[in-house]
Amino acid sequence: MYSTGSNPHIRWNKIWGGQNGGVLVYNGGLGCLEENEIFDNAMAGVWIKTDSNPVLKRNKIFDGREAGVCIFNGGRGILEENEIFRNAQAGVLISTQKYPSQSHPYLKNNRIYDGLAAGIEITSNASATLESNQIFNNRFGGLCLASGVNPTQKDNKIFNNHNEVEVAVERGLCLYKISSYTSFPMHDFFRCQTCNTTERNAICVNCIKQCHSGHTVEFIRHDRFFCDCGAGSLRNKCKLQGDSSHENDTLYDSAAPIESQSLLADLEFF
């Protein structure tokens, strides 16, 4: 963990088994992480937050129990020639919540693959420059962009991703079927005015069609979420999900992209 004014060179280490993230760079931190193995951490392998601008080069970031690299709230950074693979959420998640500056990292010549969610996810109000990356064999897709996101792209190879979110939508499934509450597929999400769903609720397109047919509904945006209808946190039972798990939506906010379930007490939601 390092912050304001820090500029370390961290090289040839194994950073693993942490109960939080592997490396946290925040509040304008700089530095270089080079040729490290960062794996099996309970949260993201690397956090880059609040106007920090480090260099990550030739690292292996893998088997994380959340995302590989999370870049939040004005985080920038240069990610070059890294191998980012087999992480439980996005290989690289880029997001800006209520923060004055936009998250905008530069990713070049990285290989991002075998993820259990998307390769790269960029949520509303964030962006990136993506050049010559290979993004492949990720469960939810290679590059997933929220409404209004238009990153700069050049010579990327995005191939052989499974696109399970689109497949589930085409099959008429509730997206909670493929995500549970542990991941956040990116797709169109809605709220139901008839059911008085709040800003903390999101409903997938198939539940809108089947479970909320005839209701007054509102399209919010294309972004990452899990479906509260399928999770059983709305008053009416989901017709697509069967027995719901009745997860508590005060613990898992679906409408806004979040940093970690364990950090919810410290976050401000949309």
Image (cartoon, helix red, strand yellow):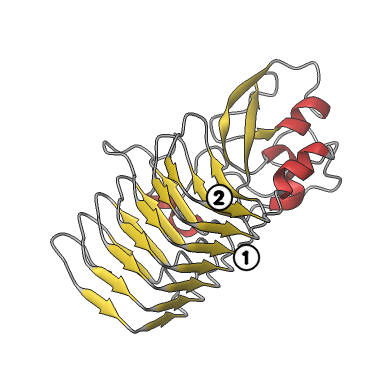
Q: Which residue is mark 2?
A: 251
**Type of amino acid at the residue the image marks with label 2:** Leu
Tag nearer the camera, 2 or 1: 1
Quarter of the figure that contains the N terminus: bottom left
In the image, taking residue 208 as reference, residue 74 lies left or right, namely left
Residue at 22% in and 75% down? 9
Residue 21 place in picture, x, y as percent: 41, 68
**Quarter where residue 226 is shown:** top right
Q: How many marks?
A: 2
Give the vertical position of 68 relative to 126 (above or below).
Answer: below
Residue at 47% in and 52% down? 93
Closer to the camera in the image, 211 or 126: 126
Q: Secondary structure beneath disc 2?
A: loop
Q: Which residue is mark 1?
A: 114
The span from disc 2 to disc 1 (Cα, nearest Å) is 28 Å
- Mark 2: few/some/many CA within 10 Å (<14, 14-19, 20+): few
Closer to the camera in the image, 139 or 74: 139
Q: Secondary structure beneath disc 1?
A: loop
- Mark 1: few/some/many CA within 10 Å (<14, 14-19, 20+): many
Quarter of the figure that contains the C terminus: top left
Residue 104 place in picture, x, y as percent: 34, 45
In the image, taking residue 149 as reference, residue 27 lies left or right, namely left
Disc 2, disc 1: CB below 8 Å?
A: no
Disc with the residue nearer the chain's start (2 vs 1): 1
